[in-house]
Amino acid sequence: MSKTVLALYDDFDVASDAVEALVNDGFDRNDISIVAHNAGDRYTGTEGVGTHDVNAGEGAGFGAIVGGLVGLGVALIPGIGPVLAAGPLGAAVAAGIGVVTGAATGGIVAGLIDFGVPESDAQYYAEGIRRGGALVSIELLDNDNRTGRAQEILNGFNPVNIDERASYYQQSGWTGFDENATPYNESQINEFRSSVRDVPTGTQAKLDVIEEDLQVGKREVEDGRVRVASRITERPVEEDITLREERVVVERNPVDRPASSADLTNMQDSTIEFTERHEEPVINKSARVVEEVIVGTEATERTETIHDTIRRKDVEVEGAVGGRSYADYQNRWRSSFDTNYAYDGTWEEYDPAYRFGYDLAMNPTYTDYDWNRVEMDARTQWESTRPNTWDRFKAAIREAWRDVTGRG
């Protein structure tokens, strides 16, 4: 399994810098992707853009400025026009648009969904590319603990807030990415960029802070029924018994002797009776109770931990500190912790890191410093009381410092 970090930029040069920063930080270029709008062939310098490889010929120089990413190519995407696509995400998008044949087989949204991007976000990212943006992603294995570092690097180049950008699209009647829409040209892209960068004087923008609450209740669910019934069954049995039988046996034996006086005395009528008898089985049955079956219900209770996620939409204000307290930022950083670092520890462990970053930002000694100048002192101070933990908490410290100072 893998996890992906995505960032959309309005400016391709900034996206290229973000890619270069990932490569320089040790991330494998084979895991990094970029999909960028190429209106007017301004990045490749080619004419008659079709589906071809730009790692050779006139496109070789472009391959170098995006870190030599794998599979860099140019394609026409319905609804967007010409794009540059490289890396695993580029391959997924290519599979969605038929890079080899040029035929639409599902579109860029389908390609992003196949890559694991939720459908709603895929719509937003596709529209962002359509309006001249560049989408950068890096794919990491589930057991890779550098997700926070990758996100920190991409955030350091001020990517588009995709939720706010989607809201901006919708204010003008946009309902979703349309593959049949006319692609933006360079003039339209420049006009759009101006509209999202400049806020007219005297106007106000209202941004809602939205947070989901987790409400856990319970309901009774019937798991099944147990029906107990009694019925009569029969089974054959057998038992041996010895029976006595008496039969009358008549035996005649031939004799030839002179009759005696006794014989002559008994020579008269007489009758003798013998009775034949036999025994027959007599069956008696008696009933005994051999088992009791007791049926009833019993209630038990158990505690179950419910695991879910809740979302919060924060409004981030970049710029001067303005005297804001740590408490003003705490909810925002707690949400960031839940998203980026909860797998690595508890909020109680990370809270001191955010507080340390806040204190650095408030320290007048570092007022005009960028992060590269602050980091060495910060590491020394941090590890003086928490040795060998800087690498673990550095991303959270820098995030707090950046949010307060408005500097990357």
Image (spheres, helix red, strand yellow):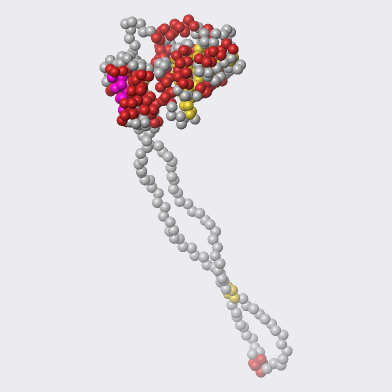
Q: Position of residue 211 (x, y in %)?
A: 35, 23
Q: Quadrant of the C terminus?
A: top left
- Residue drawn at x 46%, y 21% is 24
Q: Is residue 23 left or right of residue 103?
A: left
Task: Report whether 58 appears left or right of 220.
Answer: right
Q: Residue furthest bottom?
A: 261
- Give how far across and how far down residue 304 sits, in percent: 37, 37
Q: Nearer the viewer, residue 75 or 302?
A: 75
Left or right of 350 in this view: 227: right
Whether residue 362 is in magenta: the answer is yes
Residue in front for this viewpoint, 273 or 58: 58
Rendered view: 393 above or below 77: below
Number of callouts in the render? 0
Magenta residues span: 352-363
Indicate left or right for 342 with 284 as reference.
left
Residue 65 location in percent, x, y? 50, 14
Residue 386 is one of the magenta-drawn residues: no
Query: Magenta stretch: dominant SS?
Result: helix
